[in-house]
């Protein structure tokens, strides 16, 4: 089976992103395999799905892209749309790790203001060589922001954290009114399912 590649979040669509608890790596894999088999045999569904496993063995993150917003399930995990991205145009590095940070926010205006402030705080030139891209996702209902960042490896992210590269961002996370960090995680990509042949 060919190695899975990270999803392209710049492809238009609605992203349904959810997490669920798993009691160890074996259960993580079992959850992914069961969902994969169920979706592969379904007559209709999302255009693409990616499953990520947390490095601590406790969580499965599922990211499903729907091209038809009306077809996306109205209940269940939050629905997101891409707001802004930070990425090089001709990036060739391959992501080896996903880092997420999720926030509850007080409405759409706070979503935009908080995201714009975080992007403005990023270094103008360069950055850690292990940081590949950052995507800022806003929930459709205006209540959440999900920071989705691709890194070359867990070790690169840890190195950047120890060097203080994230300190300014953490100050914004904890000091912005109407914004509350709820959870985050480190993940490896496990499996993907694509229904749209062009992608």
Image (tube, grey):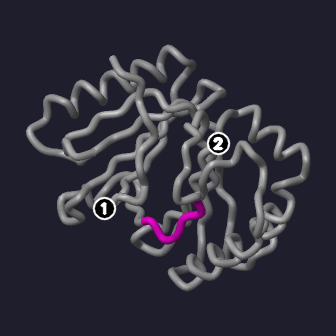
Q: Residues within 10 Å of mark 1 (few under 14, many from 20)?
A: some
- x, y (%) of residue 123? 78, 66
Residue drawn at point x = 84 percent, y = 67 percent: 171
Tell me which secondary structure the magenta stretch mostly adopts.
Answer: strand
What label sits on residue 67 in the rendered view?
A: none
**Foreground of the two, 55 or 4:** 4
Q: Secondary structure at mark 1?
A: loop
Residue drawn at point x = 40 percent, y = 70 percent: 140
- x, y (%) of residue 131? 69, 48
Does residue 160 lie above or below 112 as drawn?
above
* Residue at the extreme right: 163
Quadrant (top left/top right/bottom left/bottom right) for the N terminus: top left
Q: CB atoms at circles 2 and 1 under 8 Å apart?
A: no
**Foreground of the two, 136 or 53:** 136
Does residue 111 lie above or below 57 as drawn?
below
Report the residue marked by disc 2. 151
Badge count? 2
* Residue at the extreme front: 90
Q: Does the magenta-highlighted stretch encompass residue 86?
A: yes
Does residue 163 lie above or below 115 as drawn?
above
What label sits on residue 13 in the rendered view?
A: 1
- Which numbered mark, 2 or 1, is in the foreground of this view? 2
* Chain part drawn in magenta: 82-87
37 left or right of 142?
left
Residue drawn at point x = 90 percent, y = 52 percent: 164
- x, y (%) of residue 21? 52, 33
Q: Does the magenta-highlighted stretch encompass residue 54?
A: no
Q: Residues within 10 Å of mark 2 (few under 14, many from 20)?
A: many
Question: Which of the 4 quarters of the picture holds residue 152?
Answer: top right
Residue drawn at point x = 29 percent, y = 34 percent: 193
């Amino acid at each position: 089976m060919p190695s899975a590649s990270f999803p392209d979040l710049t492809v238009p669509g609605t992203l349904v992103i959810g997490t669920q608890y798993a009691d160890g790596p074996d259960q993580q894999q079992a959850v992914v395999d069961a969902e994969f088999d169920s979706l592969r045999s379904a007559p209709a569904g999302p255009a693409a799905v990616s499953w990520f496993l947390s490095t601590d063995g406790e969580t499965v993150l599922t990211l499903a892209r729907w091209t038809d917003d009306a077809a996306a399930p109205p209940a269940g995990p939050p629905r997101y749309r891409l707001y802004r991205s930070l990425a090089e145009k001709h990036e060739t590095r391959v992501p080896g790790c996903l880092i997420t940070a999720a926030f509850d926010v007080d409405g759409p205006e706070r979503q935009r203001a908080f995201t714009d402030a975080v992007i403005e705080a990023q270094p103008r030139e360069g950055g850690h060589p292990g940081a590949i891209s950052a995507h800022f996702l806003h929930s459709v209902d205006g209540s959440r922001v999900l920071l989705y960042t691709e890194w070359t490896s867990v070790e690169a992210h840890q190195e950047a954290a120890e060097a203080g590269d994230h300190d300014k961002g953490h100050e914004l996370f904890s000091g912005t009114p109407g914004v509350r960090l709820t959870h985050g995680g480190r993940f490896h990509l496990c499996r993907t399912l694509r229904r749209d042949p062009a992608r």
